[in-house]
Every structure is written in C-alpha cells, then in structure tokens.
Image (cartoon, rainbow, N blue to C red):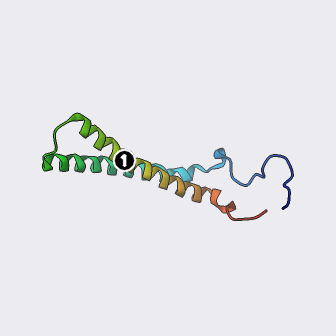
Amino acid sequence: MTAHPPGPPAESALPVAAVPISAWVPFRRLMRIVGLSAVLAVLAALAALHLTGAPPRWELWLAVSGGIAGTVLLTGALMGLVFVSNRSGHDDSVGRSD
C-alpha cells in the first residue's frame, strides 16, 4: 500500500466562488417551476382529502401540506444542484486519477 504525502488534498474541485453565474440561472428557473409544482401538488392533495371525507383537522392538513411540499421542493433542489454541478465543471474531475 502506498503512503500519501502529508498535506492538504489536491485542488481538484472549483471553489464555490468560481462557479459561473450562468450556471445558477437555470437552477433559479427550475426552482420557480418546482415551487409552482409543489403548490399545485399540495392543493390537489388537500382537495382529494376534502373529497374523500377525511376529518377536517388542521393537524392533518398541515402534515399533508408540509410533507408534500417538503418532498417536492427538496427533490427539485437536489436535482437542480446536480445540474449546477455538471454545468460549472465540478464533475469534470470525478473519476480522474492524479
């Protein structure tokens, strides 16, 4: 087994400040679409609860709204960050051996 020399790791990734602004523009657009989708999904779920005769309890409505909105927003944000990482060049160094 080869020993690695002591010291800081090699600079293989771009610092956050080096990410071009143009990589974040599609992310913001995607998050606007995801936010609208989350609102529509929450409204559809609340309408379904109302139509199925679920008890009109504020705890139920809050839990359903938070769960659906949180899931949709987190999924969209993580997927958007994957796209930002790809567009900014952070993924170029993955898989290369130095």
What residue is at 12 percent from the left and 46 percent from the top? 53
What residue is at 69 percent from the left and 53 percent from the top? 13
Instruction: Answer with left or right where residue 32 lies relative to residue 1.
Output: left
Q: In this view, which residue lies farthest toward the bottom? A: 96
Number of numbered discs overlaid on the protein picture: 1
Label 1: which secondary element: helix
Q: State the image coordinates of residue 95 (x, y, percent, origin top left).
A: 69, 65
Q: State the image coordinates of residue 74 (x, y, percent, origin top left).
A: 44, 48
Q: State the image coordinates of residue 23 (x, y, percent, origin top left).
A: 56, 53
Instruction: Answer with left or right where residue 13 lies relative to residue 6.
Output: left
For the residue pair 88 and 56, the one nearer the viewer reads as: 56
Q: In this view, which residue lies farthest toward the top? A: 58
Instruction: Answer with left or right where residue 12 lies relative to residue 3.
Output: left
| Residue 14 in view (yes/no) | yes
For label 1, count other residues whose C-alpha is less than 10 Å away and answer few (under 14), some (14-19) or many (20+).
some
For the residue pair 94 and 37, the one nearer the viewer reads as: 94
Q: Is residue 61 above or below residue 12?
A: above
For residue 85, which quarter of the picture? Answer: bottom right
Q: In this view, which residue lies farthest toward the front? A: 1
| Residue 29 in view (yes/no) | no
Quadrant of the image containing the N terminus: bottom right
Q: State the image coordinates of residue 62 (x, y, percent, origin top left).
A: 28, 38
For the residue pair 28 and 50, the one nearer the viewer reads as: 50
Instruction: Answer with left or right where residue 27 lies relative to residue 14.
Output: left
Quadrant of the image containing the C terminus: bottom right
Three-letter code, disc 1: Gly
Q: Which residue is mark 1?
A: 35
For residue 61, which quarter of the picture? Answer: top left
Q: Is residue 53 above or below residue 97?
A: above
Q: Is residue 86 above or below residue 28?
A: below
